[in-house]
Image: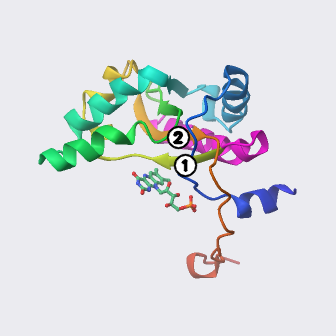
Amino acid sequence: MSIIDAIKARSSNGIMTDAAVSPEKIKQLLDAAVCTPVHHNTKPWRFLVIQGAGRQLLSDIMVQHSEDSKTIAQRQKLSQKAFRSPVIIAVAAAKPDGEKIRMIENVASAVAACQNILLAAPELGLSAFWRTGSFMYAPETASALGFEGGAELVGLIYLGYPKREMPPKSRETSEAYVRWLG
Ligand SMILES: Cc1cc2nc3c(=O)[nH]c(=O)nc-3n(C[C@H](O)[C@H](O)[C@H](O)COP(=O)(O)O)c2cc1C
């Protein structure tokens, strides 16, 4: 499949089996993830692979720090979210050292790493989707997941084997979002 076709064919697929994903496959995805453009070669990508029983910590953080955690029903719903897939990769951008480098540039590169994972997953038979949520931006969340030094979370990438194929999505064309100069 061409790269353009793979980009157009990508879609979120949240219906996954509980089957574990091998460490080799996860490593293949992470090695693809770090192949992003990076300004000043800051190597800003930080990952936490959360799987199996490790998902309980994420679940607890979601319940504790989400803005939608007011009622028992809401908390129950939130507590299940970390168990939607066998693996979740939390992706963060490191805070840059020095004033010359802006955080937004590290975030941009970490975001590109997320997209690399989403695009690489189908080649390994995996489906993937990207989630955030208000809990991710609570000041305690990044350090509770072990991201230190002012790193900022940019996404949780849920990964697993799809229970079913997704029908192709009709995709927008770009005209409405583009201006041309010259
Ligand atoms: C930074 C980011 C955060 C997102 N967070 C959520 C989320 O918390 N909940 C959600 O339903 N979709 C979220 N999405 C959108 C989905 O991941 C998905 O891209 C969207 O539903 C479109 O579907 P598609 O991936 O099949 O094109 C997020 C997307 C991005 C880029």
State left or right for residue 129 relative to residue 32. left
Residues rendered magenta in the picture: 101-126
**Would you say the beta carbon of the disc 1 residue lies within 8 angstroms of ligand 1?**
yes
Q: Secondary structure at mark 2?
A: strand
Give neighbour class at mark 2: few <14, some 14-19, many 20+ (Cα, 10 Å): many
For the residues labelled 1 and 2, say whether their Cβ atoms are less than 8 Å apart: yes
Please state the horizontal and vertical placement of residue 26, each as a whole percent of the image.
Answer: 66, 27
* Residue behind mark 1: 129
* Residue behind mark 2: 157
Please state the horizontal and vertical placement of residue 156, each as a whole percent of the image.
Answer: 47, 39
Q: Amino acid at mark 1?
A: Phe
Q: Secondary structure at mark 1?
A: strand
Of the 4 image quadrants, the one containing the N terminus is bottom right
The vertical placement of 119 against 83, above or below, is below
The residue under the point 33% across, 21% down is 143
Q: Earlier in the sequence, mark 1 or mark 2?
A: 1
Tell me which secondary structure the magenta stretch mostly adopts: helix
The vertical placement of 127 against 33, above or below, is below
